Image (spheres, rainbow, N blue to C red):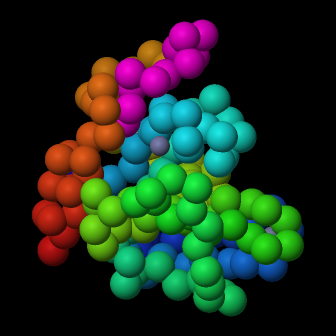
Amino acid sequence: MGHDGPAALTGRCYCGAVTLKMTAPPKIVAYCHCADCRRWTGGPVGAFASFAEADVAATPPLGQPFSSVPGVERWTCRDCGSPLAARFDYTPGQVFVPVGILDQADRLAPDLHCHAGERLPWLHIADDLPREHASGRASLNAAQDSRP
Ligand SMILES: [Zn+2]
Ligand SMILES: [Zn+2]
C-alpha cells in the first residue's frame, strides 16, 4: 500500500469556502460500502483517503464535528453541506477525506473495499482488491502504523 507522488494534495468543498491541504500522501484509500457513509456522501459507495491527523490542514479549521452514530465524527462545510472529513474511534489518529473533494482524485485509486457486506446489490465494481466484509479496521490501522 502507500501512495507516493507529489506530497501536497489539495481539496475543497462544493462552494469553495473550505479548502484542505494534505502535507503527506494518504496511507490507504478505501471504498466504504456502509449505509452510514452512503447516506453521508449521497453516493452509492463512499471512497476515502486516510491521512494522519497531523497531515491535514483545513482553512478555515474544521470546527465542531457532527455525529449521529457513536464513535464516528463527521465534518461538513457549514455553507454548502459538502462532506469534508470523518474520524472513527476504531482507527485512531486517522482522518478520512472523501476522494471526490480532492483535486488529485484521479491519482487516488482505492486499495480495498470496506464493509463489502453492505454493498448495494446492483453496484458492481470489477477489481481484484481485497474485500473486507466488515470495517476492515485491521487493514486500515496496519496501513497507518506503517507510515515512515
Ligand atoms: Zn462549502
Ligand atoms: Zn462507512
Give the side of residue 46 with respect to residue 93, left or right.
right
In front here: 18 or 79? 79
Q: Tell me: residue 35, above or below residue 57.
A: above
Q: Position of residue 53 (x, y in %)?
A: 38, 77
71 or 128, which is in the foreground?
71
Query: Looking at the image, can residue 30 be seen?
Result: yes
Residue drawn 30% across and 26% down?
133
Residue 107 visible, this orientation: no
Q: Is residue 116 magenta?
A: yes
Residue 70, placed above or below residue 60: above
What span is in magenta? 113-124
Q: Residue furthest bottom?
A: 60
Q: Quadrant of residue 66?
A: bottom right
User: Whole-percent x and y of residue 51?
Assistant: 38, 68
Residue 94 x %, y %: 35, 67
Q: Residue 120 versus residue 99: which sits nearer the camera? A: 120
In the rendered image, the vertical position of residue 59 relative to residue 73, given as above or below: below
Does the segment drawn in magenta span residue 114? yes
Residue beneath the point at 39% across and 25% down = 116
Quarter of the image with the C terminus in it: bottom left
Q: Name which residue lies at 61% across and 80% down.
A: 64
Location of residue 33 in the rendering, given as x and y in whole percent from the top left corner: 48, 32
Q: How many marks?
A: 0
Residue at 68%, 89% (x, y): give it.
Answer: 60
Q: Residue furthest top?
A: 122
